[in-house]
Amino acid sequence: MYNSRIVGLGKYLPDNIVTNNDLAEKMDTSDAWIQERTGIKERRHIVKGQGDTTASMGVAAARIAIKRAGLQPQDIDMILFATLSPDYYFPGSGVIVQELLDIPTCPAMDIRNQCSGFVYGLATADQFIKSGMYKNVLVIGSENHSGGLDFTTRGRGVSVIFGDGAGAAVLTREEDNKKGVLSSHLHSEGKFAEELSLIGPSTNRWVPEILEANDPEDVSYYPYMNGQLVFKNAVVRFSEVIMEGLTQNNLGPDAIDMLVPHQANLRISQFVQKKFGLTDDQVYNNIQRYGNTTAGSIPIALTEAWEEGKIKSGDLVVLAAFGSGFTWGSSIIRW
Ligand code: UT7
């Protein structure tokens, strides 16, 4: 059995910065409300028609990650693409990445686990590498939220939170089983499936049905979030799944060098930081600049933490996520 190790990280954010005040021009919200409730100051939005898509942003992040890994795209044995906002309903965006990276053929698989998508992707990559089936696996998290949000006052509880962007990691085979991904911990609780969801269009609620109903109140084609319920579950599950990972490795919270939480809400990260007695330097947050980029959030934050020299060889790095499904998970990594 091998271990897997992250050997390259990359990120891509669209240039277009949208501040809270920009949003306040479109809906009844304010910079003060958004900052106080979420910590977000600004986020990036794709400018439609200027070339950025979920797949293309993923490719831009992946090219950087592959280069930093000292590899060529053709060295990638498998692509795992986590998103809730794929370019098409089908096929998934992984195959578009394979084509844009000019990899002749390789397995490409989309992961549908929303905010936990990157942690699920990392766990899947780790298993394929551990088994010896593949050596180099590319994991991407990318989202184009702005293409599908309601930017009227009706949608303000959701649309001020989410931003666009992508992050990527290359994992490779590691012979030393004390290094790399030490363990992954994944969960779901489908009874809450509709509490953070986009119901239509879907095979249960197909476009002709929505059009035929012609109901101005029916906005099932926009995301819905029961914010308070999600928040309450998030703080519990984040804490549980981090502790589960530490315990499996016979470690305590004091062993954490860097926690990179999914960037859902600064208040959630601060709650978890306090719970585990971590300092500001031990928790990486960038939601202030990018909002919540769902599957993109952990790989973007991990890339930035690494670029800023905050993650060093030998560090214990913990990733943790919670979101739609509900799904949640953690990765315990010895860098
Ligand atoms: O990444 C996936 C996981 N997602 C999360 O973890 C998100 C978890 N939830 C949250 O982060 C928070 O629940 C939100 C930031 C979404 C909302 O914050 P909240 O403190 O839970 O606010 P609320 O939903 O209870 O709404 C409070 C008030 C309401 O007005 P009334 O009913 O008290 O008059 C809302 O209508 O704030 C109003 N409101 C807004 N006001 C100004 C909701 N959105 C906005 C807004 N601007 N954008």
Image: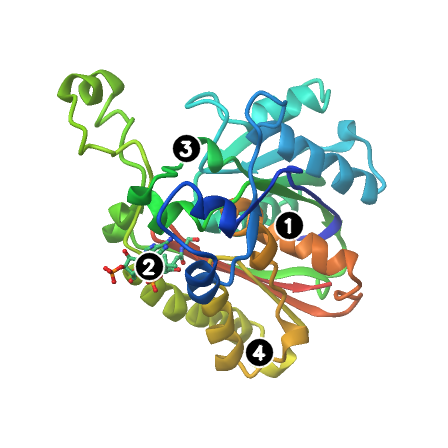
Tell me which residue sits at (81%, 31%) in the image: 72
Is 117 in front, or is 284? 284
Q: Amino acid at mark 2?
A: Val
In the rendered image, residue 250, in percent from the top left (x then y), is placed at 57, 78
**Tag 3 near tag 4, CB within 8 Å:** no
Real-space Cα separation, disc 2 to disc 3, in angstroms: 20 Å
| Secondary structure of the residue carrying numbered label 4 | loop
In the rendered image, residue 216, in percent from the top left (x then y), is placed at 19, 29
Q: Nearer the viewer, mark 2 or mark 3?
A: 3
In this rendering, position of residue 102 left or right of residue 195 = right
Q: Nearer the viewer, mark 3 or mark 4?
A: 3
Q: Is 30 drawn above or below residue 111 in the view shown?
A: below
In this rendering, position of residue 46 left or right of residue 206 = right
Pointer 2 or 3: first along the chain: 3
One can see residue 327 in this view: yes
| Secondary structure of the residue carrying numbered label 2 | helix
Pointer 3 or 4: first along the chain: 3
Tell me which residue sits at (50%, 69%) in the image: 242
One can see residue 3 in this view: no
Is 321 in front, or is 331? 321
Real-space Cα separation, disc 1 to disc 2, in angstroms: 22 Å
Is 154 in front, or is 189? 154
Real-space Cα separation, disc 4 to disc 1, in angstroms: 29 Å
| Secondary structure of the residue carrying numbered label 3 | helix
Q: Amino acid at mark 3?
A: Gly
Q: In the drawing, what numbered circle is on residue 148?
A: 3
The residue at the far front in this view is 25
Residue bearing mark 2 = 230
